[in-house]
Image (tube, rainbow, N blue to C red):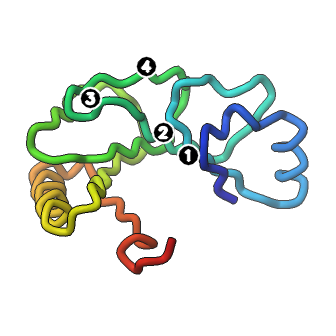
Amino acid sequence: MVITGGEPLLQLSQELTEKLHEAGYFIQIETNGTLPLPEGVKIDWITCSPKGNVKGNNHSPILLQHIDELKVVYEGLEQDLNVWNDVQAQEYRLQPCDVKDEERNKSIVEATINFILKHPKWHLSLQTHKMLDIM
């Protein structure tokens, strides 16, 4: 079960996560990382997708002690991904930014793929629901 939307760490409690685990669920969250895990909350997989001014590389500090996956929205060549070098995670993903402009989106996807080919630590993350026009 993936818990996302808004900031899931504002809603999760020890009681809820215990009940979900008792029911056999694997719990994954996607968070912006600006809040620590609430006490007693046990999550099986944490995806941290930091928010903020991507181009200026101004983002809120990550307060999580553990991250399984770092997912960064990539806007293109002017973005410095070195700011993420010290973040420890099992997986690193780049997601091309959707700017609602078909021509620009194509350019961003191309830049993302080119970056990943040169930096194999990073892997491609796509919003397939947008590609399939399923909202």
Q: Amino acid at mark 3?
A: Asn
Q: Alpha-carbon neighbours of circle 4 within 10 Å: few (<14), some, or many (≥20)? A: few
Q: Label 3: which residue?
A: 85
Q: Alpha-carbon neighbours of circle 2 within 10 Å: few (<14), some, or many (≥20)? A: many
Front-lying residue, 3 or 121: 3
In this rendering, would 81 be left or right of 78?
right
Label at residue 48: 2
In this rendering, would 81 be left or right of 26?
left
In this rendering, would 25 be left or right of 114?
right
Q: Amino acid at mark 4?
A: Pro
| 130, above or below 24, in the image | below
Between disc 3 and disc 4, the foreground one is 4
Label at residue 30: 1
Answer yes or no: is residue 123 visible: no
Label at residue 51: none
| Picture residue at 26% right of the left edge, 29% below the top | 85
Answer yes or no: is residue 16 visible: yes
| Picture residue at 60% right of the left edge, 48% below the top | 5
Regarding mark 4 in the picture, which secondary structure is present there? loop
Please tell me how many numbered marks the rendered image carries: 4
Of labels 2 and 3, earlier in sequence is 2
Determine the image quadrant of residue 131: bottom left
Between disc 1 and disc 3, the foreground one is 1
Regarding mark 2 in the picture, which secondary structure is present there? strand
| 122, above or below 56, in the image | below
Q: Alpha-carbon neighbours of circle 1 within 10 Å: few (<14), some, or many (≥20)? A: many
Give how far apart the Cα atoms at labels 4 and 2 are. 11 Å
Q: Alpha-carbon neighbours of circle 3 within 10 Å: few (<14), some, or many (≥20)? A: few
Front-lying residue, 78 or 104: 104
| Picture residue at 35% right of the left edge, 64% below the top | 126
